[in-house]
Every structure is written in C-alpha cells, then in structure tokens.
Image: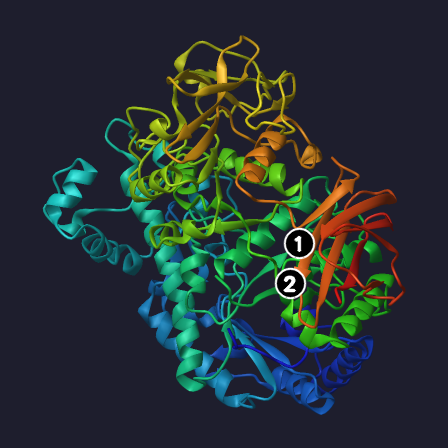
Amino acid sequence: MTKPTFGFFPVGAVHHADYLKQSPPLDPDDYREFMRGEITAMQRLGLTSYDMNFAWFDLEVAPGEFDWRRTDAVYEICAELGLPIFAWIFAELTPRWLVQQHPETAAVAATGYSGPSHSYGSALVRRRMREYITAVVERYDDPQRILAYNVGVESGLFWIEEQDSSEPAARLWDYNPEVVAGFGPWLRQRYGTLAELNRVYRDHYRDFAEVQPPNSRFIQEQFMLINQVPWLDWRTYMCDVLTGYIHFKAGCVRDLRPDAVVAEQSYVIDPAVNGQDIWRTNAAMDAVGTSMFVSNTPGEHLQGSYWHDYFRSSGKGKPYWIWELRCGPNAWGLTSWGLPISAADTARLTWQAIGHEVKSVQYWNWRPHIGGIEVGGHAMTTRNGELTPRAERIGRIARTVNADADWYASLRFDPAGIAMLDPKLARIVATGEGSDRYVTEAQFGMYAAVRGLGHRVDFLHDDEVAAGGLDAYKVLLIPFGYAMDSRTAATVTAWVRNGGTLAAGMWCGAKDEHGYGQPFNPGLGLHEVFGAHEVELQPVLSPQESSGTDMSFSFGRMPSGEPVITLVAGVSDGGSAAAGQTFEGLAYLSRLAVQDGAQVVAVDETGAPVVVHHRFGAGRALLVGTVPARPVDQQFRVDGLSRLLDDLARDAGVVPPARLVEPTGRMVEVELLRGTSDRDLVVLLNATRESVAARVTLTGPARAAYDAETKEPVPFTTAGDEVGFDLTLEPGDGRAIVLERR
C-alpha cells in the first residue's frame, strides 16, 4: 500500500491545552504565546508532528457559530514552525446546544436515561455534524500541513455520558427511537423474509417492525420467553450503527478532500457494550490505529502485545498507528494513581510499538492535565512544563527513527504462521449471559502461551475466514469459541482436514451464530474434528469461594478456581511436552469422552480426560477442556500447555523468527522485523523490574550489529547460519539492535 507515505516518521503528542476546559491561559494573546513556547519545545525535543484537537463541543458554541481563536493560534504556530498536524475530528464531544434544542437526538440507555450526548444514529445529528466537519476542513485547508484526519477518536459507545449507576443496563446504548426504528429494516436485510426471521427467533412476528430490542442483557429477561437471538442481533446491529457513524465522518472529509488520509482510533474493544467491529470499520480507513495505555502491572506487557497484534491484523496490511501512547503515570482522581513510569518504561513502550510495525507514534500527552480526573498524570513534562527523563528518552528515539525514516517505515514482520480467531460473537453472547471475562482471559492466556515462546500471532475475523483467509496460516487458535458462525466452523473443519492444525479451549462452537446450543460440545460438527466431546462439566471454585447446592446459588457467580491439569503424553516425537508436566486452567473442567483414534494428552486430578489430541484427515486438532487463561503475573511461564502448543506449531513448520534462549518464563520479549538495504531490526523488551542478561538467537547471515539509539557496536556470535546476541537489559527497558546482513 502506498498511501499514506510522509517522508519522515511521525512522532508527536497531544497537548491538553487544545481542550478549552484543560487550558491554563484563557486570554487569546496569552494562550498564543503559551502554546508557541510549548510547541517550540516539542519540536526542539525531536517531535515531528502535532496532534490537534477539533472538538465539536469546543468549536461550535451555538448553531452555526464557531469560536476559532484557539485552533487558529495553534494552526498558525505549527505552520510557522513547519510542524505538520494530525487533525482530530472529535465529534463525539457533543455541543451542549445540540441536545438541548433537539432532545430527540440524545442517546438513550436501556434504563431510559438520556443525557447530553448525541445518538450516533440520528439523521439530524449527522446533518449538523457534516456542517461542523465541513467548517473545520475548509478553514484549515492546506494539504501540506494536515497529515491525516482522525475521524474516530477512541471510537466506541463509551463516549456517551452515562448516568451514575452500577446497573449494567445503564451502559447499554442506544435506545434512541430513531435508532430503534432502524432495527426492523436491518433485520429485514439480515433475514430476508418473515418466515426466516420467525424460524430463527422461534416466534410469530407479522412484521419486522414488531421486533423490539431487549432492554437488558438477556440473562435478566424472562428466560423461558426469551432466547439469545434478539440480544445478539441487537448488539450486532449496534456494531453496524457505530461502523456507519465512523464511515459517515470519513465520507464528510473525503467529499471535500478526496486525497486526504483518513484513519480512526478504536479503543476498549467490547462489541456487546461499546459496539466495535474494527475489521469492518477499518475497511474504509487508509490507516488503522488505537490508544495504548499499558501499565507496569504484571501481565499487562503481553496484553499490550496482544492488542498491538489485534489492531495491526484488523488493517489487513494497512499502516498501523498509535494515536495515544502512554508516557506518564496514570491518574484517575483519587481512586487510581498508577505506579511511576520511568524513562526506561517509556522506551520499552515505544520500541514495543515500533516492534509491532507501528508507523506513527503519538503520545498522550505533552503536559499534565489541569482539570478533570486526570490532573497531574499522563504526560512527558512536569506540571510546570519542565522536561522529564521520559521526555528526553522519547526525544532520542524520535531523532533515531527520523534519521533513517525510510528504513524504519520499511520494517515488516515475516508472515505469521499462527492465527487466532476474533471472538466477536462469543463476547456478545457471553456479555448477555453476565460477562465476557472468560472469553477475554482465554484469549490473553492462549496468546501468552505461544507469544512467550517467541511465536508471532495474527488475528482473523469471521469475514476473512469465509473469504479463505485461513489458507495463509498453518495453525489456528480458538481459545474460547463459545459462540461461532456455523460457516466458520465448516470452513475450519475443511481446513483441518486439508492439513491445518487447530488448538482450542473448552466449549468451542457450543452455540451457533444465533446463540443456540448444540447437541455436542464442541458443537457445529467440531467434536468430530477434535475426536472428543464433553460428558461432564465440573465448576472449580477458588479457596475464597463457597459451594452451594440450590439452583439460585450460581446466579451471577463466575467460578475462579484454577484446576491443575497433568500431561500423560506429548503430541510430538522429540517435542518438549512430556508426561508429568502440568498447567493450570480456569473456572471449569470439561471432562471428555474420547473417540477411537484420539489420544488422551492430559487428565484432571481424578484421572478424567480433559485434553485430547486427534488426527483428522491430513491435519490435527487439540482440545483443551478448560478456560485456557493464565494468572496475570505468570503469563510468560513455560508450562505443559505452552509446550504442547509450541510442539504443534513446530510440527506444522512454524518456528519463531527470533528465539529468546535466556531468560525463559520471565517478562522479556523479542521481535524481529525485516527492513530494506539488507538490514533488520531486533527489538528486546524487559518488562521486569530487574536487570536481565538475555541471550537471543536468529537465523541468517550477519556482518555487523549496533544499538539503534546509541550507535554503539553490539557483539554477536555466529554458528553455522545462526546469529546470537548476549545483552544486558536494564529494568523495564527496551532496546533495538540494527543487524546488517551483508
């Protein structure tokens, strides 16, 4: 893809003073001079771009009346300094007058609450929004100054202002009458005929308009009179509403600037509550992006890598950008101040991003907030604007990548051999039943099991599976496919039969695309692929949880015990997994009946089979009868499950491009990216609080190696076609090594 290319590597920051309620000086002249000093300091540090906020709330102070004084000042200063801009079209911040004058445009919660935020499905809102976007784009019309337009600032329904309530229904949007009226036509398009709708719904509707959205998660409804279908359709419809809203904003920009680069910034992915389907959203974007606020809490480092791979994969080869990268301590009122962030931490987070093919890094933010609940946090500078060691390290990395910008822009991974299925359907159904916690923890856990051993992972959407996307991979992971499209299951079955390798956690395909349970578990015919099916389910309680026998005991509870599972065999001759090794699951043991020809690989403490390996056609499958989660402080551990998955991958011909020989089982990660000019980049990340002596090996010739930031030579050894590095990683730090191949 050639669009966008900039000729430099954008490294920039947001400034809180762009937002009126966060601005220290209010006088226009004082504001201009204050921002001149701030932006000049940013540029001197080495930043090469500026993130400029065009919040609808701040700009259009009354219908058709705009206050441009602040944006004019910043735009003109950036022009004088030659600092290009990313334009943030922050339409989610609703002008107060809009809902006050047009209450029918307000977003509505399942509780009936409507506040000051606009509905994303209102036609009137979109007309007024087009006028606002047109005013911004036409006023700031220099294409040499505007790098790209961000039309989805942390896009998701969570920007809608909520009522002060812990009730889950208070966070379910959007019951605006206009949006609800659109549900019937959406169902008509989905099902085609009333006969098909009634077949799926098990109902007697006489018109599509009769179908009303559930006003809560279906677990709260009359469970003998309801099924998952209305909930699943309603929340899928809301994903389409949000996608259409973002695409509408992109279209407003492109109608005026057809050659403009347009991107968005999805964040806090939660399809059931926040309405995101980033694969479909990003189909209309020129670049994909997100925010990345990874803390120093054990386990969050690998979750950062997970989300990097997730968002990168959703772009299907489009440039991947970070719109907000953490560069200071978290602050959330009095309730949640995060651990201090060091210069080394900031470098690790930055190299982690670049090491996942990120081509633009923007930080949140330059100076700490002065208002709201983030006062004093999230910034490069001190409260009075002095540079911190974090800022100095960011500046050094910014200068490093821009001294060789074309090469850093060229860096790419080798194609991944492992894919993981995006669990959109499973998350929506699980949320309707109370929580999608098991789905997300299984995703993180199985990702960590292979990523901790150096394997790369891409993510696949159901649409890509249907289009043949599985053919590019040798291994597929489905950690908790609680609900699955039957077409996806059929495609996966054929792929395994033709030689693919499948590994899955419990309840894979237990429900179909409408949420209906299956006669076997795994369902949708997958029990034949795995050579096993569930015969008994055993909840596993933690020591802090009490047991009960009455039916109501389990309502609203989620077991959190961690059953120990013991291997009785490996799956590969000469592999690393062997009898006697163990791993821990979460919440449940799914005890299995094993078909002829299948192999019991692991058992629970009673000796019942819970992990089964089966050869199916030319392929093979591994079924893990528990939630394959991992404690957050042990995500890098090497255990029986990680060894099983590693052996399956290696048998399929999937070998990590770079291998961390030492240390193993600790929060240390390595990435290898290929570049032009016979140079590659090796990124090493130490998320521990200690110095670590690391040994890394990779294949291929090497002529020289040096530290990307300091340019100091890095010693290496060669043995045949293997190159080895012995490096010391400082606590929390990230290092990048340039490897010259010839």
| Residue 63 in sight from this viewpoint | no
Q: Nearer the viewer, residue 540 or 545?
A: 540
User: Going 73% across and 42% down the picture, which residue do you hit?
Assistant: 297
Amino acid type, mark 2: Glu
Above or below, comparing residue 715 to residue 245 in the picture: above
Measured in 3D between alpha carbons, the distance from the residue under mark 1 to the one under mark 2, in whole angstroms, is 8 Å
Residue where numbered disc 1 is placed? 293
Q: Position of residue 187 (x, y in %)?
A: 22, 52
* Residue 348: quarter of image: bottom right
Q: Nearer the viewer, residue 20 or 300?
A: 300
Classify residue 333 as left or right of residue 270.
right
Q: How is the image coloured?
A: rainbow
The numbered mark, 1 or 2, whose residue comes first in the sequence reads: 1
User: Going 39% across and 66% down the picture, which residue do you hit?
Assistant: 245
Tell me, yes or no, whether the two marked residues, 1 and 2, touch with CB atoms within 8 Å: yes
Give the label on residue 324, or none.
2
Above or below, comparing residue 173 to residue 285 in the picture: above
* Residue 320: quarter of image: bottom right
Give the label on residue 313, or none.
none
